[in-house]
Image (cartoon, rainbow, N blue to C red):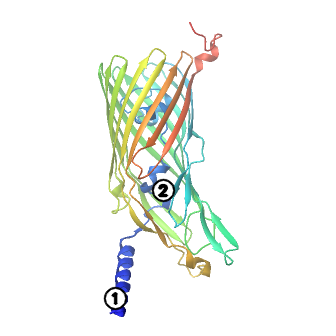
Amino acid sequence: MNRFLLVLATLCAAFGLAAQASDSLDFPQPQFMNPIYDSFSRNYYSTSAMGRGYTGIALPGETDNALLNPAAYLSEKASLHLEMLIKPPVNVNYYGEDDNLTSPAPFGIVAAGTKLGEHFSGALLYSLPKTLHLDDFSIDMNMGYYLLMRYPTFNLHQLTANAAWHSGDFHVGLNLHNQFYYLSDITILRTFERIRDAKYVLRPQLGLLYSGEKINTGLTVTPPQDLTWKFKDYVTYDTTLPLNAAFGAACKLKNTSFTGEVEFEQCSAISDAYSDRVNVRLGAETTIRRFSYRAGYIYSPEVWHGYYRLPMNNTANADSAIWWGDVAPGGYLGKNTQHILTAGTSWHHQDVNVNLGFLMDVAGKAPVAQVNASIDLYFSAFKNKKFLYFD
């Protein structure tokens, strides 16, 4: 009977492992580019928008607002925008050990914008929409006397040219996003080679905005685009940067506005295993004298969770040293739906705006927190002999 139970238990374990392997995901994109890691890699730039639930599609604003809706940059003064962000590390267990996800880049936006005649405006913006650095992927070698360490990194750098046309309550804008995808220390099993690569992609974004007396509406669309990565003879990804479309509305009551947005990301175009994501964002903002106060909520559902397999070097010269025997062939990503609360404030002056913002996930499935600080400095201040003067 004991032998029978032992054999039965072995068979059950084997079937369980086989089922797990068959259901595992082979990454359709380089690992940390996948939308399943957006819960940490995504940077919520635009401090004022972040404070009110990252809403701003239907609200005219300063230069940074052009990244949310290219039609929503509407300022009477030329200005310079500088933004810093801090994102505390998050402990994860991707490779069977404790690792930390970090976002070491300390800034979110550097931008300048101005009116271009009676009906036009333009801006130039540099931003970091996504950053992720893993500390670390390591392999024990020489009987544990040597540790080979790699630090997988994904950064998305974006240089944006913005132009918009304004006529009364109607606004139309276009962003040309010059995106630079940078990957370093790509994790590929059975090779000790350090693999880095970068890609340039031009992505247009169209925006519309109607600003009524009490109700505003806004719409923005970024079409999909194909992208191919080839990491030597190890692995090739023929992937898609998905369609992104968002609609927002704002209700204005005296010095207070209430905003709501729905954002659609067609993640299923990347892989049939992924679900399309519909983000919901809500916010409120009120202005009292020189200060604005903001609060908001972000619902960001997961697109996938489960077991995944890491790519492997299967070439003839694959390094099959015994040190790879203890390295897990994959990992597990848990449920990662996020419920995020946000808050923020601004101090307004004729020469400058100072903005602070904060957000934190309260669901606990995919923890993240972020603190932003930014400044809008109007170029007219340099001509003012009474800079930061109070009447």
Q: Which amino acid is tagged 1? A: Leu
Element type where label 2 sits in the image = helix
Badge 1: how crowded within 10 Å, few (<14), some, or many (20+)?
few
Query: Which mark is in front, 2 or 1?
Result: 1
**Which residue is rendered at x = 56% and y = 41% of the image?**
86
Q: For residue 354, what is the image quadrant?
A: top right
Badge 2: how crowded within 10 Å, few (<14), some, or many (20+)?
many
Q: Mark 1 points at which residue?
A: 5
Tell me: 273 left or right of 358: left
Residue 99 screen position, x and y as percent: 56, 59
Q: Is residue 375 above or below residue 340?
A: above
Q: Residue furthest front?
A: 1
Kindly tell me whether residue 8 is visible in this rendering.
yes
Tell me: 251 left or right of 203: left
Quadrant location, the N terminus? bottom left
The disc, 2 or 1, on the residue closer to the chain's N-terminal end is: 1
Q: Which amino acid is tagged 2? A: Met
Q: In this view, does 33 lie above or below 47?
A: below
Q: Residue furthest top?
A: 391
Q: In this view, does 36 lie above or below 387?
A: below
**Which residue is rendered at x = 54% and y = 16% of the image?**
349
Residue 277 screen position, x and y as percent: 34, 50
Specify the label residue 33 is tagged with: 2
Q: Distance between the residues labelled 2 and 1?
A: 45 Å
Quadrant location, the C terminus? top right
Residue 258 screen position, x and y as percent: 33, 27
Q: For residue 287, what is the image quadrant?
A: top left
Q: Which of 77 and 135 is in front in this view?
A: 135
Q: Do the residues labelled 2 and 1 touch (CB within 8 Å)?
A: no
Residue 221 screen position, x and y as percent: 36, 41
